[in-house]
Image (tube, grey):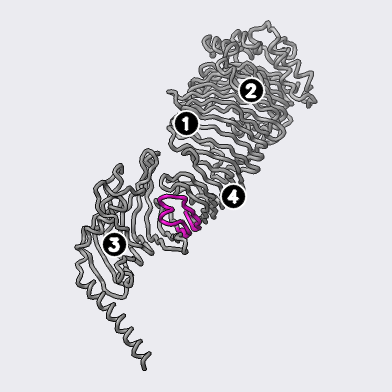
Amino acid sequence: MRIKRLLTGAAIVVVGGVAAVFAIIRSVDFNSYKDLVASQVKAATGRELVLAGDVKVGLSLIPHLEIDQVSFRNADWGSEPQMLKLDRLEADIALIPLLSSQIQIKQVRLIGAEILLETNKDGQGNWVMGTAATGGSSTAPLPQINQATIENATIRWKNGVTGESRTVQVDKLTVAPSDTLGNLAVAFDGKVDTVPVSLKGITGSLANLSQGPLPINATGQIAGGDLAVKGEIANPATIQGLALEVTLSGKAASDLGALFGTTLPPLGAYQFRTKVANPDGKLVFDGLAGKVGNSDFTGHVDVDPAATPLVVNAALASSHFDLADLGIKPAEKKSAAPGDGKVFSAAPWDLSGLQAVDGQFRLNVQRAILGDTVLDNLVGEAALQAGTLKITALTAGLGQGTLGLAANVNGAAQPAAIEARLRANNVDGAPLLDAMGMGGAVTAGRLNLEAVVQGPGASLRGLMAGLNGGIHLEMGEGAIKNDFARLMFADLFQLVTVGGTADAARVNCMVTDFATVDGIAGAKTLVLDTPGVTVVGTGDVNLRDETLHLHFDSNSKQVNLANLAVPINVGGTLARPSVSPDPLGAVGNTADFAARAANTATFGALSSLTGLGGSSSVANPCVGAAEAGSKAKQSSAGEKIIDGLGTAADGVGQGAQELGQGAVDATKKAGEDAGKALDDLGKSLFGN
């Protein structure tokens, strides 16, 4: 009975105490404490807290407080006066600690908040709090908070160093203790800009957040992919001392485009991993490795976001990289704009983006694929500085041959300036000819090519109109599509197609050598040998207006078709060429062509090497024949082939007459000094 009385008495005391607390709470005007709370916050943070609304109290075993229209002042240097504005603040207060004058908030909820997180030009975050102003009298500690929740909020991020800004939409963010050490469990659901994000993990205490180091161990989803972040931030106040390991994987890499404010083409599955650090303010991605579709890559990238322009240095390697995995496909062939009548597009090239980034780049790819083109052992080095891209060396294997490229692209110049030198040795002909726009007309097993290009980079049409340089092409056995042969050679078509198929004419060899000055491409050498005929050409292509002024002499290997071997002129434009017999060169051609001395060097050399329609064991007989023809001195003005550039205008028929003396002088000059401005370009690559 005594124990029962004691328990009853204790219960009465507890109930009485709780009732007393309720009575005290009911009698207290909490609005009168708003100034006290505000002063305590300012004492702890150095900033003003404004509680504009009335405090509402809900009585229960866990008293509930609500207040509307709450704001918290930003740092003095902030871009806006308020760091935090919210529609309503709710707090659940532990009852028992109130008996000993302690305020313990079991849960605080911020509803409808607008939060501004920003850094100044020195990288200092506005979440780093100061101390009370001089003369402040209150040093009372802030209430203890067990759990904080933010709902339906907007967080805006402004980077004072780079000017970058982002917006985070918070559906729900919860922060609660995770262990006795003070670490916090964090859960977030919302969007970064328009990208869905869901994360859960463990981080450090509030003291770690302000003083560091701040441990992070989180997993979740971002843009439909699986994300994991582990490591620490040594100084969270300035976001310095990053030491993080990040992995990201997903089913569609195209979903990541929204993170960067862009739309990517449909892409396949992906996985990335990297270590992230930021020594000296740079953002360093080390041990970078990943895969997109069937393409893989490894390497190192560092970025200096504070530099102007942005500085990016990268060294990447891959064992297999198919550009289709990045949504990059060979350009579709497009016809000229209606009514334009031009082959070269006038669409402007915008190279101003080259001024946005400086850096050094290295690339090593064992197997690179673009459409049907496969490059082996692709190695490249390039630098981007003050708007000028300099490709110091880019080499690769193509089939059994090799490619080499050196180039300068000055995007800061007005107009932009392009200089490049390309060399191809014994490469597969199909992809290279296709890249040159000849894939639909000519096929070849092996090619040698050397091209030097210098000109304005405003557009393809502008580049061609002001082009300086030259191109030398040597083709071994191949074929010319019959449609193209019929168009270019007209009456010679039957000779050209001897020994061919229903679709294409067989070619023993071909050599072309054009020198270009200010948009006039003069033919130094143009030799084509087929089983039925040898064709030697001269003249020019005016790249400014896309007009053709070419002349072809021919030597029939088929005696019964010798009457078809008449000189022809090719005029018109690149888009619409026209072919006609040369009325001057045709006189007496069929009667005494076999006996005349004209073009003896070229035609004779090819005859001795290839025979009448026979094949050759020599790699490219056209090369030797062209050299013999260029050295020979011809006596008949109407029957000369090109002798270097010196005799191109002395009587090659109507086509050469149309060329005009100005173009002749230009092509002569091209042979002497075209490309001098590029003489040093690529010396380390090509050795000359």
Q: What residue would you read off at disc 2?
A: 684
Residue placed furthest toward the top: 635
Q: CA distance from mark 4 to mark 3?
A: 48 Å
Give the answer, above or below, for where 86 lies relative to 611.
below
Q: Residue at x 53, y 11 (%)?
A: 660
Quarter holding residue 405: top right
Q: Tell me which residue sits at (22%, 75%) in the image.
A: 23
Residue marked by disc 1: 354
Q: Amino acid at mark 3?
A: Leu
Part of the protein shown in magenta: 198-223
Q: Quadrant of the N terminus?
A: bottom left
Q: Amino acid at mark 1?
A: Leu
Residue type, mark 2 in image: Ser
| Mark 2 surroundings within 10 Å by alpha-carbon count, few (fewer than 14), some (14 through 19), many (20 or more) | few
- Residue under label 4, please give it: 293
Reading the image, the residue beneath label 3 is 89
Answer with mark 2 or mark 4, whichever residue precedes in sequence.
Answer: 4
Residue 330's image quarter? top right
Could you classify mark 3 by the number of other residues whose Cα lies within 10 Å: few (under 14), some (14-19), or many (20 or more)?
Answer: many
Sort mark 1 into few (<14), some (14-19) or many (20+) by Cα contacts within 10 Å: some
Tell which circle, 3 or 1, labels the residue nearer the N-terminal end.
3
Q: Give the alpha-carbon distance from disc 2 to disc 3, as whole Å.
A: 69 Å
Q: Name the disc covering residue 195, or none.
A: none
The image shows residue 247 at horizontal and vertical percentages of: 55, 52
Q: Position of residue 156 (x, y in %)?
A: 35, 49
